[in-house]
Amino acid sequence: MLVFRYGRALAAGVALVLVSSPPAAAQDSSTAEQTIDVMNTLFGKHPGKRANHAKGVVAEGSFTPSADAARISKASLFAGPAVPVTIRFSDATGVPTIPDGSANANPHGMALKFRLSDGSDMDVVLNALAFFPVATGEDFRDLLKAVSESGPDAKKPTALERFVATHPAAATAGATAKTPSSLARQTYHGVNAFIFVDKDGKRQPFRFRVVPVEGQEILPDEEAAKREPNYLMDEIGPRVAKEPAKFRVLAQLAEAGDPTNDATKPWPESRKTVDLGTLSVSKVVADSAEAEKALLFMPNALTDGIEVSDDPLIDARVQAYAVSFSRRAQ
């Protein structure tokens, strides 16, 4: 449920997809359905494509756990040898032709599907935002509605300006995501909190973070805008065919008093991080466009030893992803 940049960038950048007013949502529709309806209004309907993060590329790789991971969680993901992983990199917005270097293509996303030894899957959904612009699914829907009602001719203060006045993270979250030189040179954050459970039942809240071993490399806005429209999607395949792109999968651990139910509030950088292991991206699949149609990444698709927290956005994302998937599968 990740969208384009917010606040100043949002207000300035989404004019190209704004319409004068969205269709009224049915009164008995769910928040998730209303959210996808507004996305379809903002970005248009593109059959077979996701309502958001429509443009992407699917890759394959593996995850090798660290010894520290097994000490903090009893999850089978951390207990044995390397497991296969399906990775989907993506641009923001529901526009499948958005230029990769556009400001509106931020935050770029990374979704992971770990293929566990027992035959089940575990999903992790990340993006380049250091924190989310809103804390609930209802607020996310309302943010999108405010954007859709705040075109260049909207009366001041616009709906978006009024929304930002009462939701300060909406004005600042977007600035934390910048355009990388490569999808392999971006840091991806898990804005939602989850819970590790170890073999003794000890529980530890945490947030995922996936960091490129080569280091993050961000382009100046002017340079990013000059790049070829598909430069990120076209570059990743040849890069990993030559040499796998490696990422460190980290867990930032919460301390007492750190909120687990509010994705707008990042925890201090002084919090301890645990190196969970190495993600290696080794190839782009032969027919990425076809492969991604069947892929559904769910933030609550976990395994014993990792649990959802009290963050309400997790269920909100699950519900919205399900609606988006059902519509694109029709």
Image: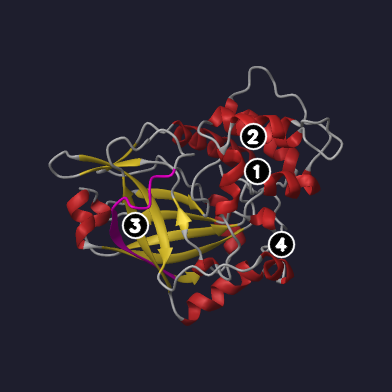
The answer to whether marks 2 and 1 mark residues whose Cβ atoms lie closer than 8 Å is yes
Give the CA separation, mark 2 to mark 4: 27 Å
Residue sitting nearer the eye, 261 or 2: 261
Q: Which residue is mark 4?
A: 99
Q: Marks 1 and 3, Cα distance to the nearest angstrom?
A: 28 Å
> Which percent across, then down, holds residue 245?
44, 72
Q: Residue at x 22, y 48 (%)?
A: 73
Q: Amino acid at mark 1?
A: Gly
- Could you tell me which residue is drawn at 14 percent across and 44 percent down? 199
Q: Quadrant of the N terminus?
A: top right
x and y percent of residue 40 in the render? 71, 39
How far from the left and from the top, in percent, is residue 318? 49, 36
Q: Secondary structure at mark 2?
A: helix
**Total label count?**
4
Q: Earlier in the sequence, mark 2 or mark 4?
A: 4
**Spatial separation of the CA atoms under disc 4 and disc 3:** 30 Å
Q: Which residue is mark 2?
A: 164
Residue 70 seen in the current view: yes
- Whether residue 232 appears in magenta in the rendering, the answer is no
Real-space CA distance between mark 2 and mark 1, rounded to the nearest whole angstrom: 7 Å
The boundaries of the magenta stretch are 266-281
Q: Name the residue rendered at 72%, 47% in the picture.
A: 46
Residue 300, numbered label: none
Give the residue number, with chain letter if any, for mark 3. 250
Specify the quadrant that holds the C terminus: top right
Crowd rating for badge 3 (residues with CA inside 10 Å; few <14, some 14–19, many 20+): many
Residue 23 percent coordinates (x, y): 77, 28
CA distance for labels 2 and 3: 31 Å
Front-most of residues 142 and 6: 6
